[in-house]
Image: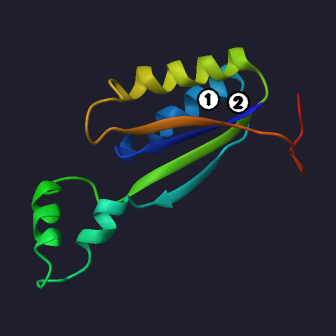
Amino acid sequence: MNVLFVVLNKTEYLEDVLDAFVDIGITGATIMDSQGMGSAMTDVNSTEEPFYGVLKNMLEGSRPYNKTIFTVINDDKLLDKAVNKVKDIVGDIHEPGVGIMFTVPVGNTYGFRSE
């Protein structure tokens, strides 16, 4: 059993990802508003630290907020399907600004109905 985390920088893909999850049999997920560290650091209006100005210039045009989806998946085949669906929707996840995706093994769950 794993939890799949998908951090979508391109939030316009959120509905497509959720629809794809339902299509393959994932019936529950949690979506959170989130913000990356770089974006949060550039929100600081510090003119005394040159680092923040450099960081702000590097992130110019990037999206300040994202959506984080996470879902517990009990089946490795279903997990593979979910990962592939996300990749199909967002394109090359390795491109800057797309987002990240990762899994974490789950030991125990409570309040979670296993199919």
Q: Quadrant of the rendered structure where residue 87 is?
A: top left
Q: Badge 1 is on which residue? A: 21
* Towards the viewer: 64 or 3: 3
- Distance from disc 2 to disc 1, alpha carbons, whole Å, reads 5 Å
Residue 25 point in image, percent of width and height: 72, 24
Residue 77 point in image, percent of width and height: 70, 14
Q: How is the image coloured?
A: rainbow
Q: Are marks 2 and 1 in contact (CB under 8 Å)?
A: yes
Mark 1: few/some/many CA within 10 Å (<14, 14-19, 20+): many
Query: In the rendered structure, which amino acid carries the disc numbered 2?
Result: Ile
- Residue furthest toward the top? 77
* Towards the viewer: 13 or 64: 64
* Left or right of 24, for residue 19: left
SS of the residue under disc 1: helix
Residue lying at 34% horizontally and 24% vertically, measured from the top left: 91
Task: Count every numbered label the image shows and give the total.
Answer: 2
The C terminus: image quadrant: top right
Q: Quadrant of the rendered structure where residue 82 is?
A: top right
Q: Badge 2 is on which residue? A: 26
SS of the residue under disc 2: loop
Disc number placed over residue 87 in the picture, else none: none
The vertical placement of 97 against 43, above or below, is above
Mark 2: few/some/many CA within 10 Å (<14, 14-19, 20+): some
Residue lying at 39% horizontally and 46% vertically, measured from the top left: 11
Query: In the rendered structure, which amino acid carries the disc numbered 1?
Result: Phe
Residue lying at 49% horizontally and 36% vertically, measured from the top left: 101
The N terminus: image quadrant: top right
* Towards the viewer: 2 or 70: 2
Residue lying at 56% horizontally and 45% vertically, measured from the top left: 69
